[in-house]
Amino acid sequence: MSSEFAESKILSPEPSVQNKKRKVVLISGGSGGIGRATANQFADLGFITYEVSRSGTDRPGIKHITGDVTVKEDMERAVAMVMAEAGRLDIAISNAGYGIAGPIETTSESDVKMQFDVNFFGAVHFIQAALPALRTSGGGRILVTSSVAAVTPIPFQSFYTCTKASLNQLVLCLNNELKPFNIQCVALMPGDTCTTFTDHRCLTVAEEDPIYGNRAINSIRKMENDERCGSDVEPLARRIVKLTTQKRTPKPVQGFGPGYRTLLFLAKILPVRLMNGILYKLYAKS
């Protein structure tokens, strides 16, 4: 589906009177983890809630749309379906993503490309598809799920870090481009959160790597343990709802959780060499 065709479909629906009164949200990657918890909270609050993902089913108050963020036409079709049924789109949450982990040297080109295809280009596809609908609806808000790793680069998770850093910059650019259309964009950077994300991480290193020994796998296992012992997903979902519904314009790039906000502040004020040395001791020394 071309972008011109998608926009023409967006401009033509006849929404019901009831739908005109209710805000509409579309979430990518809404079948599990952060996306699922966020969709549930929007539905509980009475929003018309859609989630688009490769797998999933309709749930009470939530309409599932099957789609892959790496396929731009899937995202255009999802937005066109929302507009045809609900007549408007007020909030777009780009949440789909996954992680790969391993040394830069030994990670295949195909793994690197897939990491960027899902985390970065998937967000671009989703946002590009949503923007005409948000403009037609009079404005709205876009939230992108980033990560603390975007600012505190984690060794052996370098390409995941790069995708999240790219998303932060994308959001800053979007805010300036979209200001005349009453559309605000925010990148939210959570730290360790207990979700199925950990179990779906793709490892690009063996237990005993011939070059890096057990340093890489030990670093990854430490991160996995931190995530499994991390924060519950529900407070994060509530924060996402608040940022996308509050009247005042949110700070465009921000962390979540007192401990992680402190870490992000330290990353701003400490010399780069010192901060990187701290990360080495935490995640790469042994």
Image: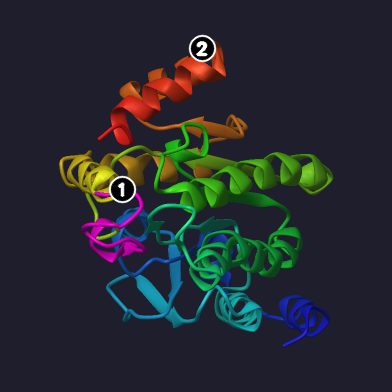
Can you identify the residue that label 2 sits on? 270
Q: Residues within 10 Å of mark 2 (few under 14, many from 20)?
A: few
The type of residue carrying mark 1 is Ala
**Residue 148 position in % (x across, y down):** 44, 36
Determine whether 29 is above or below 253 in the image: below
> What amino acid type is highlighted by mark number 2?
Leu
Quadrant hosting residue 186: top right
Q: Which residue corresponds to the image point at 43% horizontal and 75% vertical from the top-left?
A: 53
Is residue 286 part of the magenta span, yes or no? Answer: no
Q: Quadrant of the N terminus?
A: bottom right
Residue found at x 23% / y 44%: 227
Q: Which residue is mark 1?
A: 216
Q: Quadrant of residue 10?
A: bottom right
Majority SS type along the magenta span: loop
Q: Which residues are magenta?
A: 198-213
Farthest-out residue, bottom: 1
